[in-house]
Image (cartoon, helix red, strand yellow):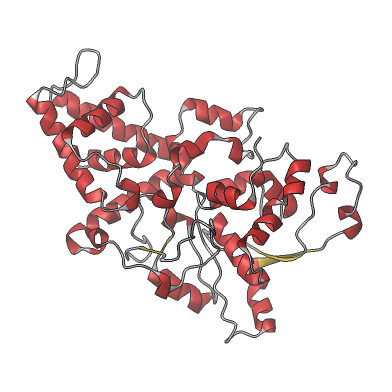
Amino acid sequence: MRYLIASDFYRWFVYFFEPCRLLFRPKKVANNEIKSKMEKHSREQDLDVAGHEASLDEPSIEAHIRKIPGTVLDWLPGESMYSLMARNHRFWGYPRPRETVEVFFGTSSERTLNNHLSEIELFVAKTEGTLGGPNKILENHTLLQFYRAFMDAKQRQALTSKRLRAESLLKFPIAVWTSRFQVQHPLKACRVCIKDDLRDIGMAYWRVAHQYPGVWVCLKHGRPLQETKIKPSAQQRFLWHTPVRKHLSPAPGIVSGQAYSSKFLELAHLVTSIAADEIKGAELVNAGRSRVVRYVEQLGLLTSSGRLKVFAKEEVKILCNRFVEVGQELRELPEFRHLPKCAESAYRVLTSYINGRKALSPTTQIALIHWSNGLPL
């Protein structure tokens, strides 16, 4: 296993598994009031100093891992992994992002001494399980909720095999879909949610459901989501920050426009339904492909072996151009910019989708499922 420095690990893990945070108002909230407000969203962790200074020769991993001292803020409803760490970074007052990463995921020496553990396992060990076990964290606070419905049989087996447990997230090849994570997973927030958070709990945070690819509408308020303007530089690699209204970019015009708002609301419902339940999500994904295959079959464009007929046929070109038109709307959003722009590219996508032998990216499949829902069957 390659050991990741804090900044490298963040790029791979934390940005991929989306965002959230607490916004403190120090000018309005005194220290004792902050403590009171945070009480139900934090846990006190009492450390046994002697245990942390135990010999490194001790076989127990407890001797190799320093637990987090003091207060650790607890999860807020629907909060992401990134958000939790961003809130704690602000709460602790660390000047450098790397310090918070090392607190939660271990220093280089801790990772070296525990090379049999993945970063998520180190996270659970350092928090003593008070924030939940690996499965709970992955299923409730990361984008695994979205991606699991698109896993094939081999990938699902990897999650349950003894060689590669679900807890060992960083050893799981889900990153194959996230090489462009900074583009595909921009931090998004709802202005009304921020306002409500500040009013109700005195803090705003990033919600996992707002970070799903294809979700650009808040289902609670029906308002367009807005992307944060704060971006890490090449030198910084990453930043811990929480949603602030003045730091949000205007919503994409394609989403906020009245002519398209209902379409993107439907898309948000579709993606959220897929992410809500692993089994039902996989069924929705399979049903979308079945609708496309059935539609193409009705058009008489399938061969006897169930493949899409050659591109030279005029009817096939018309079919491909229909999908290009659907993609033209979606390409306004960052996670869909890779969708085909011409009939030839659309043909390659549809051929792979209908054959079912080559895995397409989840965002491409989302676009196809969204398209299939409007097909005249």
Q: How many marks?
A: 0
Toward which corner of the image does residue 283 lie, by quadrant?
A: top left
Residue 255, placed above or below residue 315: below
The residue at the point 77 percent across, 47 percent down is 109
Q: Residue 342 at what x, y percent from top left?
A: 18, 37
In terms of depth relative to the viewer, which is nearer, 136 or 50? 50
Q: Which residue occupies the extreme front position in the image?
A: 235
In terms of depth relative to the viewer, which is nearer, 282 or 208? 208
Residue 291, placed above or below residue 16: above
Toward which corner of the image does residue 291 lie, by quadrant?
A: top left
* Quadrant (top left, top right, bottom left, bottom right) of the N terminus: top right
Q: Residue 169 at what x, y percent from top left?
A: 59, 40
Residue 280 can be seen, yes or no: no
* Quadrant (top left, top right, bottom left, bottom right) of the C terminus: top left
The residue at the point 54 percent across, 46 percent down is 12
Q: Residue 312 at what x, y percent from top left?
A: 11, 22
In terms of depth relative to the viewer, which is nearer, 347 or 263? 347
